[in-house]
Image (cartoon, helix red, strand yellow):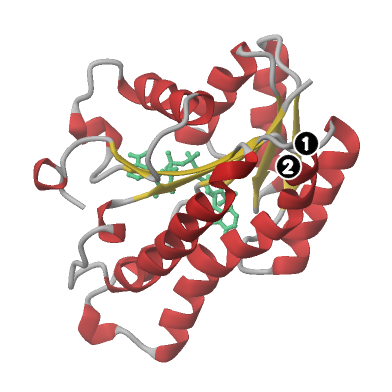
């Protein structure tokens, strides 16, 4: 059974992507910090007929992330698809004049370093299989800095650069690396199929080869 690991799995996009990949026959590894919330989400998915398990980890603490991914692979099987989508803290959405080196470092640990650790944990099995996908979900500050969202404006471009290089480096190995940029809150974007439509787009990124970056909507129409 193919396995998706959702790093930053909550009731919003994480749950929608879990259902979308679950419908395609994937087992689901849910990863976020709060074990009891994750257990509740796993129970909901299991009750809906999917195979889902919860593994608590904080993306800013590499050992917890690596342990969660190792347990998921041991219990569910090698990770076929990795979604990296932890919801940024409000601290990373502060004005640039409040930026400190400590905050910049934490934002980079959250966005770029967490992804690098996760990729290094799952990539050997993907390369051995000759297939897999790594999907990053980011806001509009990955494309255009905003002085009122200083932390993500510093950290998302670093994460994006790593992802784009990976996309090119793994292109010939059958491993897809993609970024979906969501410029603004999904409810405010008033999309035809709401969050399930976004999950459909993410499924397409996994299933069909394409460019590194996909904008959910053009940046100028979004708010973030
Ligand atoms: N939904 C939207 O409207 C929207 C719009 C634009 C962009 N996005 C992007 O889409 C992604 C998903 O957003 P969402 O709100 O819909 O997500 P979600 O799946 O409802 O939840 C994301 C989860 O990330 C987890 N998280 C936060 N910090 C973490 C950390 N340090 N380590 C591990 N997990 C952490 C949180 O759980 P814990 O607190 O338990 O850790 C949270 O429940 C995010 O990258 C977000 O920036 C969403």
Q: Extreme front residue here? A: 172
Is disc 2 surrounded by few (<14), some (14 to 19) or many (20+) residues within 10 Å?
many
Q: Dots 2 and 1: beta carbons under 8 Å? A: yes
Residue 45 lies, in percent from the top left, at 66, 20
Q: Which residue is drawn at 67% across and 63% down?
A: 117
Where on the picture, by quarter, is residue 93?
Answer: bottom left
Quadrant in the rendering for residue 82 = top right
Identify the residue shown where x is 59% and y is 26%. Answer: 18
Q: In which quarter of the image is the N terminus?
A: top right
Q: Is mark 1 on a helix, strand or loop?
A: helix
- Tell me if residue 218 comes above or below residue 163 in the rendering: above
Q: Which x, y percent locates residue 23?
A: 60, 12
Residue nearest the viewer, comparing 28 with 118: 118
Taking the view exactly as shown, the residue that stands out farthest to the bottom is 101
The residue wearing badge 1 is 129
**Res 82 seen here:** yes
131 relative to 172, above or below: above
Kindly indicate the quadrant of the structure image that contains residue 21. Answer: top right
Q: What SS does tag 2 mark?
A: helix
Q: Is residue 83 visible?
A: no
Q: In the figure, 107 relative to 47: above or below?
A: below
Residue at (46, 87) in percent of width and height: 102
Residue 201 percent location from the top left of the image: 39, 26
**In the rendering, at what x and y percent does residue 118 appear?**
67, 56
For the point 72% across and 35% down, the residue is: 39
Left or right of 46? Residue 183 is left
Identify the residue position indicated by label 2 in the image.
126
Which disc is residue 91 wearing? none
């Amino acid at each position: 059974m193919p396995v998706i690991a959702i790093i930053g799995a909550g009731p919003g996009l994480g749950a929608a992507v879990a259902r979308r990949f679950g419908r395609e026959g994937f087992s689901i590894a849910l990863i976020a910090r709060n074990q009891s919330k994750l257990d509740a989400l796993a129970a909901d998915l299991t009750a809906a007929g999917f195979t889902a398990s919860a593994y608590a980890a904080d993306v800013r603490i590499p050992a917890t992330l690596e342990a969660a991914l190792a347990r998921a692979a041991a219990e569910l099987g090698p990770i076929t698809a990795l979604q990296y989508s932890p919801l940024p803290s409000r601290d990373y959405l502060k004005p640039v004049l409040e930026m400190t080196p400590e905050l910049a470092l934490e934002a980079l640990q959250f966005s770029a370093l967490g992804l690098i650790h996760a990729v290094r944990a799952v990539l050997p099995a993907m390369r051995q299989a000759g297939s897999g996908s790594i999907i990053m979900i980011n806001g509009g500050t990955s494309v255009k800095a905003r002085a009122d969202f200083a932390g993500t404006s510093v950290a998302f471009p670093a994460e994006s650069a790593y992802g784009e290089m990976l996309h090119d480096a793994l292109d010939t190995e059958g491993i897809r690396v993609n970024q979906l940029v969501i410029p603004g809150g999904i409810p405010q974007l008033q999309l035809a199929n709401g969050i399930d439509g976004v999950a459909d787009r993410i499924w397409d990124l996994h299933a069909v080869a394409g460019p590194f970056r996909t904008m959910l909507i053009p940046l100028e129409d979004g708010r973030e």
